[in-house]
Amino acid sequence: MNQMTQPADLDIDYGPLYAVRKKIFPQSVSGTFRNIKWALLVACLGVYYLLPFVRWDRGPNAPNQAVLIDFPNRRFYFFFIEIWPQEVYYFTGLLIIAAMTLFLMNALGGRIWCGYLCPQTVWTDLFYAVERWIEGDRRARMIKDKRKLDARRVVEIVSKHAIWLFIAWWTGGAWVLYFADAPTLVKELATGQAPAIAYVSIAVLTFTTYFLAGHMREQVCVYMCPWPRIQAALTDEWALNVTYRYDRGEPRVSIKKSEELRTKGEPAGDCVDCYQCVAVCPTGIDIRNGAQLDCIMCGLCIDACDTVMKKVGRSSGLIAYDTDLNVRRRLAGQKPIYRLIRARTVIYLAIIAIAGLLMLYTLATRSALALNVLHDRNPLSVALSDGSVRNAYTIHFLNKLNELRTVALEVDGLPDSVVHVVGSDIITVGPPLVALAPDQTREVRVLVTVPAGREIDKSTPVVFRTRDVVTGETATAQDHFIAR
Ligand code: SF4
Ligand code: SF4
């Protein structure tokens, strides 16, 4: 078992580096933290399974799925937000916010992400619920695990794995619905007409969900996931971790013995050594040994212990979200101190706020029209027989509106130059016009010619300016005009 600093037992035996897996049979428990976990489980799974079916009207030329990753058209839709590949920096912003939120959670309550919101925890919890429903609670499962197989037991095992596989398949099925119109894809999947990649993705996710949540369980949290190690390096003494208050619990003795000792005026802790906190733990640890990397901070041992304390008529909170520092302070007769607002929580919050506001601002002020320019490399410049000089460019227009637009193209920085869009479909006497289809990009070749006799530098900076002829919206891009 991996151990972090442990004030009560500094001479603890850390055991061998390798240990054979012990089967864990977590007992059901009820209480505040279990209720919070159930509520989050329903909310997270509800969102995950149902979100692809939520519709969002974006007009006649756009998909009406609220959340859609449209790879063929290279778009990401999230309700009223539409992200183009050129705007991938929004994902950077989201990643920064996600990382800082994780760090903030860690600074406030240790591994609470792991205990309540991590997909591994949520699906494992669901798989445990199925297991308990079919095979019974901890004691029954432990007995059945040792018993020889009979027909009834085989039926139980088959039923459990069948339901697990169904949940896993449903999980994989829901995932692919985020990548295509969900109702259409459901029909195609049912009739065998969906793309092969959809079936492969569902198969892979079915296997990983079934294997990780049904078989690997706590092994993922303890051995596979890097977050506990990173989290341990990021935490400080003020983070609230699930803590056994040994100042109050020790020495542990049975209820009967504690009464005898207390009558004699001898010390007797509140812990009655009932092992209920260990029985309910999904990673099978004893929180009374101190803070451990294996603990996912799910709080279920708090519920178990509070239930025991209530039964024996003692106050709850023998195990609670607390700090070792406070336990030591109580032992020294001092008042506990809680510091939720400190430098690191303020910094994390500030970064989240700045990144969020920046993203909101850029989203609110983003242009629905853009262009990129690429100068021809070979030849850079062409001298024509009449003495004029011509440069060629490839211009990429982006029309982010769901409507047809006509834009004019001009070049600043080269007086008297002539701009010609090759194959332009709109004839005009002014600047050339280009038609842009709704929510599409368009690439055109553009020739810029400077008449003979004009004085120009060897390399002149130019600005390509495009303007919507109806709305007046403009976009610009810079490049150079090369003289020979
Ligand atoms: S020790 Fe308590 S909080 Fe930690 S994983 Fe076990 S039950 Fe959850
Ligand atoms: S549940 Fe509470 S009383 Fe029972 S062993 Fe754990 S800490 Fe002690």
Image (cartoon, grey):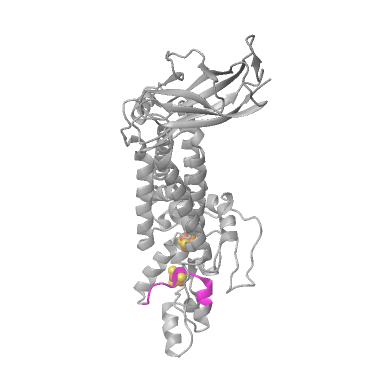
Q: Is residue 118 left or right of residue 482?
A: left
Given residues 301 and 401, the one toward you in this image is: 401
Given residues 321 and 311, the one toward you in this image is: 321
Please check the rendered image and state whether residue 476 is part of the magenta-colored stretch, yes or no. Answer: no
In the image, residue 169 above or below residue 337: above
In the rendered image, the quadrant that contains the N terminus is bottom right
In the image, residue 16 above or below residue 152: below
x and y, in percent, of residue 264 in the image = 45, 90
**Image: magenta residue range:** 314-328
- Is there any visible trace of residue 195 in the rendered image? no
Residue 454 sits in quarter: top right
| Number of numbered markers | 0
Q: Is residue 270 left or right of residue 378?
A: left
x and y, in percent, of residue 443 in the image = 50, 21
x and y, in percent, of residue 226 in the image = 58, 51
Picture residue at 33% right of the left edge, 29% below the top: 183
In the image, residue 58 above or below residue 407: below
Picture residue at 62% right of the left edge, 28% below the top: 460
Given residues 109 and 443, the one toward you in this image is: 443
Given residues 40 and 380, the one toward you in this image is: 380
Picture residue at 44% right of the left edge, 50% below the top: 357
Outermost residue, bottom side: 264
Image quadrant of ligand 2 equals bottom left
In the rendered image, the quadrant that contains the C terminus is top right
